[in-house]
Image (spheres, helix red, strand yellow):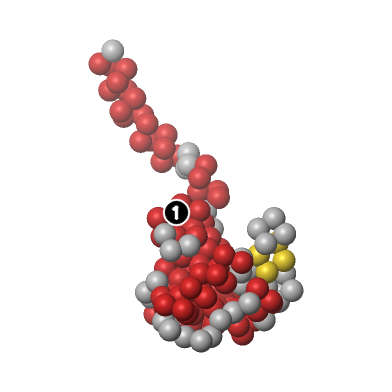
Amino acid sequence: MKKKILILALCVPMIAAKCPSLKTHYAVNLPTIKVNSITEDKLIQALINVESANNDNAYRSCEGAAGALQIRRTMVRDVNRILRRQKSNQQYTYEDRWNRQKSIEMFNIYCNHYNLVTPEEKARCWNGGPRGLQKLSTKRYWEKVKKQLAIQN
């Protein structure tokens, strides 16, 4: 038994070196993105590309997500709640989701309220809500956004 373990211990590293893991075939080599070089405009454009392929009229009926940033009704309600807490008279309607500029305003209000600073925080929480950083699904979303950012550069 000890002899088999010793042989395995010696052979496995040699076999692994000659036969690379299958996972490497799925790796995508993207250019390195410097976080400090990502402007707010670039991030928003990348989000729009991921969310709606740059289509202001995009609608995903199964989620009720509308517009360039694919805003749901719950997001409009959340942004309006934030504005009320800030004692603002400004409020958004569900129709405002179709307006790119108003969608971007809602995005900024949301990110500012939740103190989202980095592009990753903003993207992942936009996709997954205030606890988006804790969700595995938002990591995949962030990879899509990074891919779009790399294309822009």
The structure residue drawn at horizontal position 45% and vertical position 75%, both measured from the top left corner, is 82
The residue labelled by disc 1 is 135
Asked which quadrant contains residue 93, the reply is bottom right
The structure residue drawn at horizontal position 35% and vertical position 36%, both measured from the top left corner, is 13
Whether residue 110 is situated above or below residue 17 in the rendered picture? below
Q: Amino acid at mark 1?
A: Lys
Q: Position of residue 91 (x, y in %)?
A: 56, 81
Q: Is residue 24 left or right of residue 62?
A: left
Q: Position of residue 92 (x, y in %)?
A: 59, 79
Q: Residues within 10 Å of mark 1 (few under 14, many from 20)?
A: some
Whether residue 33 appears in this view of the structure is no
Q: Position of residue 21 (x, y in %)?
A: 48, 42
The quarter in which the N terminus is drawn is top left
37 or 108: nearer the eye? 108
The structure residue drawn at horizontal position 45% and vertical position 39%, both measured from the top left corner, is 18
Determine the residue located farthest toward the left in the rendered image: 2
Q: Is residue 125 left or right of residue 25?
A: left
51 or 79: nearer the eye? 79
